[in-house]
Every structure is written in C-alpha cells, then in structure tokens.
Image (cartoon, coloured by chain):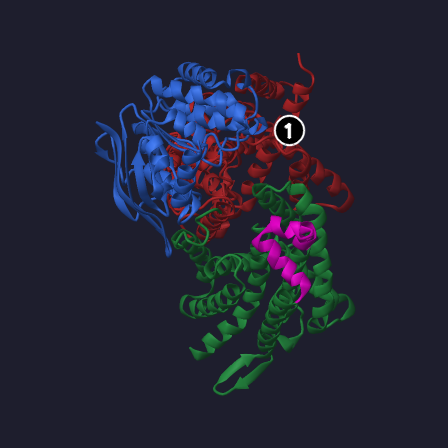
C-alpha cells in the first residue's frame, strides 16, 4: 500500500506555475528520491506535500486519508515529518532542547521525551553535542539537527530536503549509512537531493521534476540514462551528443 | 459637507507628512519607529520654544527646524538605536519604545502636562474660497506638505544619496558590496524621517496645541495611514493621509469630538486585523 | 535550568515576607507596589518572554482585573474573593479574545505590539467615558476591613497574600518551563515554521499563552484594586503598567523564571530613588521615574541582551564549578 500519494499537485505564484500537475507515490518502506535541476519546483512540491503551502490544484493522501486541507502540525501528528533546505534551528536553544520539541509530540512526559531525544541524537551522531547551543553547530551539525528533530517526532514518512547539500565528501559518506539505517528500521523516506552519488547509492526509485512537471520516474540507473532527464539538466540536444560520444568511445575501445 | 471634506484634506496633508517619515523609515530600515510620536511632540515643543523665546514665526522656523531634526535623527539612529539593537528587530522596537518613554516623560517633567498654544490669533485666519471658508494656516500647511513630499520624492529619485537609500532598502547586502555603508544610509533615512516631523510640527503649531502627549494621537493616525497605504510606500502615505483626514473630519461632524478619539483606535485595530495578509503577512 | 532559579526566588520572597517584623510602613508600601508589578510582569513574561510575542498593552488585562473586582463589589455586592476569581477569569477571556483576533490575522512583531497597545487604549477611553466604570472620577471600594472582604487591618497580611501569589506563579512558571508546554512556547518564539513542522499547533500555543498571561496580569490588577481601594481609567488601563511590566521583564531577563520578579523589584526601587532624589532638588516632578525606566530599557538592551538573569548566568558559566 502506498503511504503517501500526491495526485496532480499544482501551485501557482502569480503568473508562474511552479508545480504543474505533479504526482508521486511513496510506498511503505520505500526510499524515494526527488531530483531535478535548480528551480524545478522540488521544494515547492515538498511544501505542498507537508502542508506549508496550499495547492492551487490536486490532492495529497497520507495513510489512505485525504490530508490536502490539513495544516502542517496535523500532518506531523499523523506521522509526516520534514526537514528544511535552509536549516531552521531554534537558535537560542541547546541541541537537546531542539530535539526535545520534536520528541514531545509523542511523549508528553519530560523524562520519556528526554530519553527519546537523546536516543535520536545518538542515532544521527549528535550525542556528544547535546548541550551545545544550536547556533554554535557547524553546517554538518545543523543538517544532523534538522534530521534529529524530525526523527524525534517518530514519523512514518520522513521528507528530507537536501540534507546533504553543503556537506563535504567525507561528511556525506558519514551520513549516508545513517539515512539507510533509518529506512531499515521502518521509516519511509522521500528525499530531495542533488548529490547524485547519494541518490544512486540510497534510493530504490527516483522521480524527476523539471519546470514543475514530472518528466520521468524509475530506478536510479534507468532514470539517469533517460534522454529527457539528461536534456532537462544539460540542455536541448545534450542527450544526443553524449550518446554520440559514448558510441565513439565504445568504438575506440 | 464640502467644507468638511476640504478641511479634512487640509488636515490630512499634515498627517501625510507625519506618515511619510514613518513609512520612509520602515521602508528602508524595516523597523517600526515607535518613537515617531514622541519625536513629533519634541519637534512641536521646539517650534513652540523658538516662538516663545525668540518670537520666531513657525513658518520661518521650517528650514532650521528641518535641518536640526535631520541632525538629531541621524545621531539617534547612528549612535543610539543602531548600536543598541544589535541588528535584531525586536530589540529595535524596544529601543525606540524606550526612547519614546524618555522623550515624552522628560517633556512632562520639564513642561508639566499643561497645554500650550502659540497664542496668536493668526490661527483663526480664514480664506474665502468660493462658497467655503478655509483656515489660512491649514491652507499653507497643505501647500508646504505637498511641497515637502515632492522634495523628498526628488531627493530619493534623483540624488546619489537617494539612490543609495533605495539600494539599501531593496538589497542591503548588495548595496554593501557596492561600497555603500548601510549604517550611514540608515542614519540619513532616519534623519529624513525626523525632518518630515519637524516640518509637520511647524505647520501644525499655528492651529494646534502642544502638550507632552500630543504626538501619541498623531502617531496612531500615522500608523493607521501607513498600514492602509502599505508599509514603506510613499504615495500610499500621501493618499492614505488625505483619506484619513477626510474620514476624521466627516466623523467629527457626524459623531462628535469625544468618540472621534475612540474612532481612530478602532479604525487602527480594524485595519490591522482585516487587512489582507499580502502586504505584511509574509514576514513581519 | 529553571529549578536553579526557583530556590533563590522563593528565598527572596520569604525574606520579603519577614519584612513586616522589621521594616517601616513606607518600606512595606513600596514592597506591596513592587510585588504587584512583579506579578503583572510574571504574566507578561509568559507571553512576551517565553512565547516571544511582545505586548505593549498588558494594561488591558491589569485594568480588566482591577475593574472587575471593583465593579462586582460596588455595583453587585459580590464578595471580594469571588471578585478576585472573576477578575482573573475575565483576564483570561480578554486575553484569549485579543489573541484570537490578532493571531488569526497573523499579526506578529511590531504589529502585534501596536495592536495590543490600541486595545488597551480603547479600553482606557471607554472606561474613562462610561458611567458604569465611574467615568473620569473613578471608583472607590468601600473600606471594610475583614478577611472575607479581602481587606486586612495590617499591611503585613496583604503583603503575605501578594508575596504568596507571586511565589505561586513562580512555581507555575518553573513547572511550565520544565514541561512540554514550555518547550512549545519557546519553540514558537524561536521559529514558528520549525515548530509547525514538529507538530506544534502554533495558534493554539499562542492562545493558551495569552490567556494564561492575561489571567496572571489580571490577578495583579485585582490585588492592586484591593490594596488601594481606588482606581480610575488612567491607573487601571494606563500605559504606565504596560511599560513597567515590559521593562521589568526585559531588564530582569525575559523568558526566565525569576527575571520578572527581580526586574520589577529593581525597577520599582530605582524609580522610587529617582523620585526622592529629584524631589529633594526640584520638588515633585511628574514622569521622572519613567524617564529613568525608558533610559534603562535602552541601556539594558544595549549592554545586557538577555537581562540580569542572562548576565548572571554568563558570569556563573565563566567560573565553572
């Protein structure tokens, strides 16, 4: 059964159709990627799915329920958690207090919530930094904090908006197993990502958004070979040129 | 009725000038200057003082007053409000609140709560205009207000300083990269806002009174105008000012004086609550 | 962190409660006024300090409590204690209504500050004009000492009552700060979008905060009315109380358990000293304490960004145990 189903979502900003009839599904236990060139509308689509923006058209179903009109906090309570591309820490609070806000969603009592928060912090590698101010964290630390807060709400579906952006290669390498482990303990994930190494490595299915429209979807290797996808990234005619180069290279070998 | 409308327009011009200073500061510094009313009170006391001490006619005081308040505003923003706020909007609000408390109560301590006027009867001069009798000082005020607004417009659109102000208002970081010092531009803008108040004070004095709380009434009117006309919009402040002047004049005619005071607060609340979120809902 | 603030606070209040055995009536009067302001400031702190919604119009709640207590007794012969309870409840209701109107209209920051100020001013003008509230002449509560009338023959008992109330709110604040509601208040203050994403119903949190805040500040208004047995519109709904509670919190440390109490006691003390000092030079001068308050606000924000409590905390951290 699909956990999340977005049906032909659209969002108009004045004259600009930022998302244009985009649909996608996340199956239970899936780790789905959402890729596309800059300005394709990925973050807008995330905002529609998580309820931060109201769609101009289309519907969102979560756990078989129509949540199109539900505010973000209700969706979070149902089990949908998101991170922000531009990190949004509670800057004046410690790492522990930040994660605690998420943990309180399912655990009204302080002791239990603190226990959950500390467990999540350890899981994402923030264990030693629990008492630091969130504003004092490095970029990588803040990305982990975003992840930890979302996880602390004990979601069924995790929406990750570029959690790897701005990290150096070794930091990326460190966090990939963390994401895989989260999926392996039963949390479904939909991730926007530009770091293709991670997408190829992690995702079992990828959707490609370009100019607000879904132009392709399928397993990562298939999708990255799709001429339409290559053209969306590299411009008109690029696919043909690459294919020609590939054929030449093959002939020489 | 026509006379009430005309009188409202004339009064509205002074409101517009007060609102102009407020909206300019908001548009560039993105702060609500809570001390605006107190600074207007201060300007009115200064104009009154110049008249009482040296017999200086308020209309002749316009230029020196504007220059003086420009300098005062520059100094306040550059060396008090700016540094004390540490770049945080909430702090700026509190700092300007603090300033307004200091100014208002210092005036109260010095001059007590007595109400003063110029005492000259020129305040009652009237001009016959067709079927209407219009107050001469208000007519002068109307003309000078429009002139001052036009002058401000010219400064903003034509001079280098004006361009720097608009650049900082639009994109602070970008302006900074072009070698503009935003602290200087902020201070100049705040100074211009205060100069508007000084001009307004000189124009209001002949027909109005002065006491340590006189600015409060004006500032709420000015806030209403600025919210109505769009925060940061100069034409909005002008049109809004004239509009509120007319509404108040008609309201006074129909409802009487005591409820008029209440009316302005109620209108203010309604404007804030009912205003479509477009203008300030995004990130206030 | 909250528990560490709690004990010094309770100790301070206990010390104040002992003052009637040693201090003069002047000192007791000062302490009474200061504690009433402290209580009102504790109310402001819940909304302004913890939830980060700066109100410039807490006089609305203070006045509501004061007038409710007075009018219920004078016009309807209601018992003073019941009047106190009604005043507190009314404070909560008015808070909820103002909150529902302004938070639904998505007012925040400067706009919220301005609209709260306008609400307080509307109430002041109405109370000053209506016969029901005694108009400009104000209201006098009949002097009839007796525990059942919430009037006591000695200042000491009233001081104990007020100090007890402040202590109760101190405990309440510490309890809130430690728990889920407190965490959500602070989350709303720091970043509304992030809070929303973590399942926090931002509007509901703000409404609970302003209702609670209104109730506490209204309690201060009720006690003020019972202490002085007189009020008019410019006392009950005057900007002085809005300003004093705000500055007390900001100087003492907004969003800390003990900040408002320390801030109010210090501020009130400074104000009295200023009045006395200047009074000896120039006779009684109106507004001089407020000049000092305003200046302190500017200086405090410039040099003590997190209030006295924040400053103390930084000092403690500098000398690790």
Across and down, in percent, residue C310 comes to 62, 27
**Chain A: what color?**
blue
Seen from the viewer's position, the closer of residues C179 and C45 is C179
Q: Is residue C266 visible?
A: yes
Residues in magenta? Answer: B159-187
Q: Which residue is labeled 1 in the image?
A: C308
Q: Is residue C174 visible?
A: no
Residue at the outermost bottom position: B130
Instruction: Write down which chain is painted green.
Output: B
- B252 displayed left or right of B69: left
Q: Is residue B186 magenta?
A: yes
**Badge 1 sits on which subunit?**
C
Across and down, in percent, residue C259 comes to 58, 28
The secondary structure that dominates the magenta segment is helix
Q: Residue at x 72, y 47 (%)?
A: B79
C117 vs B191: above or below: above
């Amino acid at each position: 059964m699909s956990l999340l189903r977005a049906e032909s979502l659209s969002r108009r900003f004045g004259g600009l159709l930022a998302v244009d009839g985009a649909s996608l599904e996340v199956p239970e236990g899936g780790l789905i990627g959402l890729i596309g060139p800059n300005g394709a509308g990925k973050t807008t689509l995330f905002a529609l799915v998580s309820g931060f923006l109201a769609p101009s058209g289309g519907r969102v179903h979560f756990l078989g329920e129509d949540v199109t009109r539900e505010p973000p906090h209700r969706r979070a309570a149902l089990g949908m958690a998101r991170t922000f591309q531009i990190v949004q820490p509670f800057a004046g609070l410690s790492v522990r207090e930040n994660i605690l806000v998420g943990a309180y969603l399912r655990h009204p009592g302080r002791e239990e919530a603190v226990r959950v928060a500390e467990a999540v912090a350890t899981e994402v590698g923030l264990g030693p930094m629990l008492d630091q101010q969130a504003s004092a964290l490095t970029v990588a630390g803040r990305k982990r904090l975003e992840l930890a807060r979302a996880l602390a709400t004990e979601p069924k579906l995790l929406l990750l908006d570029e959690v790897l952006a701005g990290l150096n290669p070794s930091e990326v390498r460190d966090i990939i197993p963390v994401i895989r482990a989260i999926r392996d303990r039963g949390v479904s994930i939909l991730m926007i990502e530009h770091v293709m190494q991670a997408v190829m490595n992690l995702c079992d299915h990828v959707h490609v958004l370009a100019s607000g429209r879904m132009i392709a979807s399928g397993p990562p290797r298939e999708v990255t070979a799709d001429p339409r996808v290559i053209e969306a990234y590299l411009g008109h005619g690029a696919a043909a040129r690459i294919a020609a180069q590939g054929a030449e290279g093959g002939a020489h070998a | 009725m026509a006379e009430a409308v005309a009188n409202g327009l004339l009064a509205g011009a002074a409101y517009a000038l007060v609102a102009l200073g407020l909206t300019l500061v908001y548009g560039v510094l993105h702060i609500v200057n809570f001390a605006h009313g107190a600074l207007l009170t201060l300007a009115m006391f200064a104009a009154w003082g110049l008249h009482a001490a040296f017999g200086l006619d308020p209309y002749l005081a316009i230029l020196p007053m504007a220059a003086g308040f420009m300098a005062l505003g520059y100094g306040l923003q550059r060396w008090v409000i700016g540094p004390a706020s540490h770049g945080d909007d909430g702090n700026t609000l509190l700092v300007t609140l603090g300033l307004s408390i200091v100014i208002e109560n210092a005036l109260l301590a010095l001059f007590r709560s007595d109400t003063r006027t110029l005492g000259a009867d020129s305040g009652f001069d009237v001009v016959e205009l067709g079927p209407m009798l219009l107050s001469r000082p208000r007519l002068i005020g109307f003309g000078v207000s429009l002139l001052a607004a036009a002058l401000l417009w010219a400064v903003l659109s034509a001079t280098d300083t004006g361009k720097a102000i608009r650049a900082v208002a639009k994109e602070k970081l970008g302006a900074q990269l072009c070698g503009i010092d935003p602290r200087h531009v902020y201070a100049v803008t705040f100074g211009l806002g205060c100069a508007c108040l000084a001009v307004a004070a000189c124009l209001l004095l002949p027909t109005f009174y002065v006491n340590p709380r006189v600015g409060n009434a004006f500032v709420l009117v000015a806030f209403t105008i600025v919210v109505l006309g769009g925060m940061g919009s100069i034409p909005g402040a002008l049109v809004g000012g004239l509009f509120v002047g007319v509404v108040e004049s008609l309201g006074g005619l129909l409802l009487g004086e005591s409820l008029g005071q209440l009316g302005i607060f109620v209108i203010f609340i309604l404007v804030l609550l009912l205003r479509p979120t477009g203008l300030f809902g995004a990130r206030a | 962190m909250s528990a560490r603030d709690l004990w010094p606070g309770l100790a301070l209040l206990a010390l104040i409660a002992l003052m009637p055995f040693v201090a003069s009536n002047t000192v007791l009067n000062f302490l009474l006024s200061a504690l009433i302001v402290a209580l009102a400031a504790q109310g402001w702190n819940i909304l302004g300090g913890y939830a980060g919604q700066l109100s410039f119009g807490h006089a609305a709640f203070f006045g509501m409590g004061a007038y409710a207590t007075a009018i219920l007794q004078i016009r309807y012969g209601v018992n003073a204690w019941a009047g106190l309870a009604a005043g507190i409840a009314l404070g909560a209701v008015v808070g909820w209504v103002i909150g529902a109107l302004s938070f639904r209209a998505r007012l925040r920051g400067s706009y919220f500050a301005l609209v709260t100020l306008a609400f307080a001013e509307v109430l002041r003008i109405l109370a000053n004009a209506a016969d029901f509230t005694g108009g400009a002449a104000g209201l006098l509560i009949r002097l009839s000492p007796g525990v059942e009338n919430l009037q006591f023959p000695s200042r000491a008992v009233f001081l104990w009552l007020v100090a007890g109330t402040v202590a109760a709110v101190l405990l309440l604040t510490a309890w809130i700060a430690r728990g889920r509601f407190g965490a959500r208040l602070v989350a709303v203050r720091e970043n509304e979008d992030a809070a929303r994403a973590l399942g926090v119903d931002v509007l509901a949190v703000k409404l609970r905060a302003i209702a609670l805040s209104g109730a506490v500040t209204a309690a201060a208004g009720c006690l003020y009315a019972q202490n002085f047995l007189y009020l008019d519109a410019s006392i009950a709904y005057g900007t002085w109380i809005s300003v004093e509670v705000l500055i007390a919190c900001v100087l003492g440390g907004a969003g800390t358990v003990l900040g408002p109490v320390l801030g109010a006691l210090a501020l009130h003390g400074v104000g009295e000293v200023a009045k006395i000092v200047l009074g000896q030079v120039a006779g009684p001068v109106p507004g001089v304490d407020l000049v000092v308050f305003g200046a302190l606000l500017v200086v405090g924000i410039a040099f003590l960004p997190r209030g006295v409590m924040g400053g103390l905390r930084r000092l403690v951290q500098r000398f690790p145990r």
